[in-house]
Image (tube, rainbow, N blue to C red):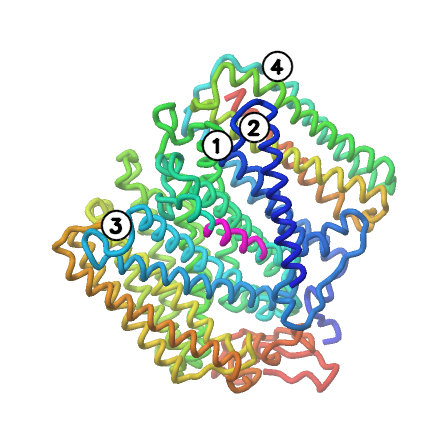
Amino acid sequence: MASTAIPQASATTAERLRMHHAGLWLFIASESFLFAAFLSARYYLAGLERPPELSIVLGLALTAVLAASSVTAKWADTALAERDATACARWLAVSAALDLLFVAGVLGLEWPAAFTHFPIGTAYGTAFLSLTGLHAFHVVSGAVVLLLAAAAVRRGSVTRDRPWGEQGAVIYAIFVDVMWLFIFATLYVL
Amino acid sequence: MSALIRAIAWGVVGSVLGAAAVVIVRAATGQDLLDFGQVTLAAYPLGLAGWLLGIGVWDQWAREWFGLPLRHVPPHGWRRYFAFTQDHKVIGIQYLVTFTVLLLLAGLFAMLIRIQLLRPSGALLDMNQYNTVMGWHGIVMIAVAVAMVMGGFANFVVPLLIGARDVAFPRVNALSYWLVPPVAVLLLLAFLAGGWDSGWTAYPPLATVNADGQLLFNLAIVTFGLSSILGGLNFIVTIATLRAPGMTWGRVPIFVWSVLAASLLSFTVTQFLAAAMIMEILDRVAGASFFNAAQGGAPLLYQHVFWFYSHPAVYIMVLPGMGIVLEILSHFSRKPLFAYRVAVAGFLGIVALSGIVWAHHLFVAGIGDEMLLPFMITTELISIPTGLVFLSALGTIWLGKLWLRTPMLFALGFVFNFLIGGLTGITLADVPTDMDLNNTYWVVAHFHYTIMGGEVFAIMAALYYWFPKITGRMFNETLGKIHFWWMFLAFNATFLLMFWVGLNGMNRRIASYPPELTGANQVVSAFSFALGASFLVFIVNLVWSWARGPRAAADPWHARTLEWQVPSPPPEENFPRAPEVIGHPYDYGVTGAAHAAFAAPAEGGGTR
């Protein structure tokens, strides 16, 4: 019985990393339910109708910005695996910047354009406001954790051997980007 | 205490900053300075952040993000109960004490309701006060039923039951607890802001146009939901990854299974409650129209989203209650838990079905006829997994050598009451009978049989059962038995009669009723006061025993599960010697059976 040890008190770094990943994926599953509630609400309120005025070009441009931020976040992951802290921190910061650019686009371009055609007080306006607003809030939180991770990587407290701070931020940021695809499809395409 | 004072100070500073920002922006754009909705929506999140950072998130968590060394709470002394302490046992006690106080407070509100109903037109409160009191009673009791077991007992006991040092994420655990005080503050402040006359269900359109207190209610529920989600997530990872060597899924104690099942629900569907609240906030503050039918919204949408959480929430409350009861029935019948695997299947079956039954709450709300039959069938299907749990309970008692101590009495009380609650539920799942019974006191009696007769009796069973382990002291058995019989008889007298009142057409949620029901209501009220008084025995027993009771042995119930194999109360590190699980936890009377062996730095691995 020499092998017995008290779980948690004796957890190794690898075990802790696995637990953190499991916790984050559960959190992502949980957040998906929140988005699912608002996505269902949009169909409940407005059926399959979609106002023709929406500019799909603007929507695609915003999607491209967000997709780029996912790619740069993944590059940060690769850089850390190659022990290149400088590159990792840089790509994390670039991802955060792209995320914030996206939010600026939503709030500054998408909203004014959309709400002239269907005000917030209409069914589609309500769906549009809640879905893009909820998502933008998540993107901002993703940018914040990316920036915190970038600082930690630069400082050297997050490394290839202790990668949680960076991996967690990247997984969360990419989740938020993926969620946009559902929202984009729901608001612009379907 | 200094952390508490700092938390309050930072919370106030955060709120003021948020409020000031809104006022400045509004001044700059030339609007009226004060808008309750906008000010609250800016002040509350910042205030909440300040409170959490002040209580310990900054010292024990956020400093790490900025490359600063962490500052921890000393692990001993009473101060740790007022701090951001990461020990699951401390957090369990924080939850238990907080929610016992809330249970008693919300019970006093029930007494107010019953005083009001002594007269057909109301004896005490005006209509708006009555609605707020009823809403407060409802929502706080629901919070108690959710968090007392999942926050309190599960926190204290689950890591011990599975042989772990702590939960998977001790800091998240502490965060879950410290999200609770702001909820209580908001619900109390809501009284000052005009109350919320929409009751605990907060149905729109009323809930989007009524007094400002409603907004505080909405924010409180979002906050409590976050606490519940984080708690559920924590238990899933804990139970999945931190079981002692040898504890296979077939050897996991049944209470742990029930907590896992309830966590699967709470970390997912709670988001729908948050969504419902956020929708109402957007309608109220941002001019959205989720629920404003005049502008294309749909009030029924709220009921769908709300009940998609709130029906499964019943199982978040009752599943761990079932786990406690099965646990106690086995230990006090001195028999192996009957049909262990079937009971686990029952739990998981309830989890699976609970997500597709919500619309039975909407049978009379105007949903399409085509939705009636499917939801009636799914709702009635849920009696099958529930029946499996009953099978396990009754099979365990059957021919057992029952040891009728206080915890066992409450566990048996659960079985009796929950049976009545379950059977009367069928009348509400059936569309034809529900058309008649919906929104009457029949419903009130039914769900009090499930939540109070079920869950609260399970809470009492757990309190008495784990009291020696948690406090290190024994309670007074005679007072415990008096409490049980008093509470059991008064409970049944109160709520059996309520079925009759409901059958005779008394509407629920309404401050007045037809005069011909006066006599019956006065009898119900009298019994309910007796029920309330039974808690005085409980308070006296627990407070006195915690201070002065005789020292408890490590294992006063001769139970085999791991929490009883360590001293009472357990040492800070939980297990002085590492456990290894070698058999099933309930093999009472099985020759040569043992649940666990312990590694031997000290005295050579005894088995039990």
Instruction: Say which element carries label 4.
Output: helix
Disc 4 packing (10 Å; few <14; some 14–19; many ≥20): few
Question: Of callouts 3 and 1, which one flags the residue occurring earlier in the amino acid sequence?
Answer: 1
Spatial CA distance of label 1 from label 4 is 31 Å
Residue B544 appears in the picture as rendered: yes
Query: Any mark on residue B511, and which?
Result: 3
Spatial CA distance of label 4 from label 2 is 16 Å
User: Is the C-beta separation of discs 3 and 2 under 8 Å?
Assistant: no
Question: Of callouts 4 and 2, which one flags the residue occurring earlier in the amino acid sequence?
Answer: 4
Identity, as a three-letter code, of the amino acid under mark 1: Val
Spatial CA distance of label 3 from label 1 is 29 Å
Q: Are marks 3 and 4 on the same chain?
A: no
Instruction: Say which element carries label 1.
Output: helix
Identity, as a three-letter code, of the amino acid under mark 2: Thr
- Read off the residue under disc 2: A132
| Relative image position of residue B44 (x, y in whole percent) | 56, 43
**Image quadrant where one finds the C terminus of chain B:** bottom right
Q: What residue appears at the point 78 percent right and 39 percent down from the top-left corner?
A: A77
Residue B185 lies within the magenta run? yes
Q: What segment is highlighted magenta in the picture?
A: B178-188
Query: Any mark on residue B554, and which?
Result: none
Q: Chain of mark 4?
A: A
Disc 2 packing (10 Å; few <14; some 14–19; many ≥20): many
Q: Nearer the viewer, mark 3 or mark 2?
A: 3
- Read off the residue under disc 4: A57
- Read off the residue under disc 1: B285
Identity, as a three-letter code, of the amino acid under mark 4: Val
Along the line of sight, the residue nearer the viewer: A135 or A28: A135
